Amino acid sequence: MAERTPARDALWVSVLYLTLFGSFGLYGPFVGDFLRQAGLSAASLPIFFAATRLVRVVSTPVWTAWVDTKSNARDALLVSSVPTALFFLWMLFSSPGLSWLFAYALFVILRGPSVSLCDVLAIDASARANTTYGKLRLWGTVGYCAGAFGAGALLERNAGRAVLALTLATTILGALSVQRLPTVETPKRGSYLADLRTLLSQRRYVLLLLCSSLHALGLATYDMLYGPWAKSHTNGTIAGLAIAVGGVAEVLFMLSGGPLLRWLGGNRALALAFAASAARWVCLARATSPVAIVSLQLLHAFTFGAYYLASIEIVERESPPGVRASAQGLFTTVSFGVAAAIALAVASPLIRRGGLALVFDVAAACALLAAAIAFVGLRERDDTRSAVAVP
């Protein structure tokens, strides 16, 4: 086996992001299509997704608390990888039905904390390899782009089983990459509960959770419903291309947006990201042509790229060392769990009343409110430096 070095560890973290988000790209944007085959109606999809997000609200803090107190991020990812692979194996060789819905809920429990745990490994690897978190995280977006574009093209040819097979393969490759990473123990400094209380007393951290929750209405709806919506307005290939274009814009921002983030500071960077999201949702609600649908995806550089990098920086800065995994997990749980579940539950009656366009209009208003809170409430502290280097 090749000698382990910080640069090699950073490489394997990049491979982990590539495979993990590659699987997300394959099944995520179009998972609604698979679940509709299992018997869910279009109107009931948001409710089902909301329910499964709430399941993750319970599972993710349990996972991350285990990591901070008893285990480490690497071993936790390994524990979750095998059952996750079994989920896709079950879907691949079984017929659509109620069992798919139960299997998906189990999948959410097992895979919910994976992104938070990857972020913990990436932050550590980037510091040791003298690189930046963004340069490792961007490989997740590359994987997502490739997966989404490939899934869209395959579904256009009614090759749903091929999508499931590829998702299974990327999941297995991801588990193999985790095995090549070193064990990163969370520093144990004092009481876990005391550190957790300290985290929750940080004003900027709490306000970040609030802003992210408001931003979630548009982001959660986009993540779970955009693929089928874009496909209904164009076709599977164009829908996959649109998602890929958004991913490319995100990658480019992660590669070159560092100077902008440093110049703006965390509060102004998030305010800009939320304002750009508002503009995106307003325009998307009225987009009908393939050119408009694809072009608006360029704003994903801010909707997710700038938003996520700035958020991870604030989380890492405000986190006591003994609860790093829990801090990332709580951010993920609130933003992509609780808030996303509420957003998707709200989206269901809004869709019945005015379609997805009404959801995006309401999301735009929430994003503008988040921008105002971020600009005023998330001002930088002059006496601290970020633990997360931006590219």
Image (cartoon, rainbow, N blue to C red):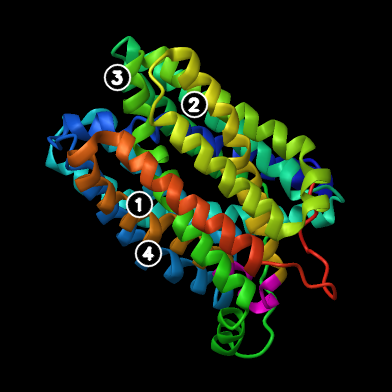
Residue closest to the eye, 344 or 32: 344
Q: Is residue 209 above or below residue 217?
A: below
CA gap, disc 4 to disc 2?
26 Å
* 295 lies left or right of 318: left
Going by the numbered disc 1, the residue's amino acid type is Val
Q: Earlier in the sequence, mark 4 or mark 2?
A: 4
Circle on res. 108: 1
The spot of residue 216 in percent (x, y) is 44, 52
Give the mark, 4 or 1, whose residue is nearer the N terminus. Answer: 4
Answer with left or right where residue 240 lies relative to residue 179. left
Q: Is residue 348 left or right of residue 24?
A: left
Residue at 67 percent across and 81 percent down: it is: 188
Distance of mark 4 from mark 1, alpha carbons?
A: 10 Å
Between marks 2 and 3 in the image, the one whose residue lies nearer the viewer: 3
Q: Residues within 10 Å of mark 1 (few under 14, many from 20)?
A: some
Residue at numbered disc 4 = 57
Three-letter residue code for mark 3:
Ser
* Mark sitting earlier along the chain (1/2): 1
Q: Against 293, is 317 above or below?
A: below
Task: Say which quadrant the C terminus sits in.
Answer: top right
- Quarter-wise, where is residue 158 in the image? top left
Q: Which mark is residue 243?
A: 2
The residue that appears at 26% across and 28% down in the rendered structure is 33
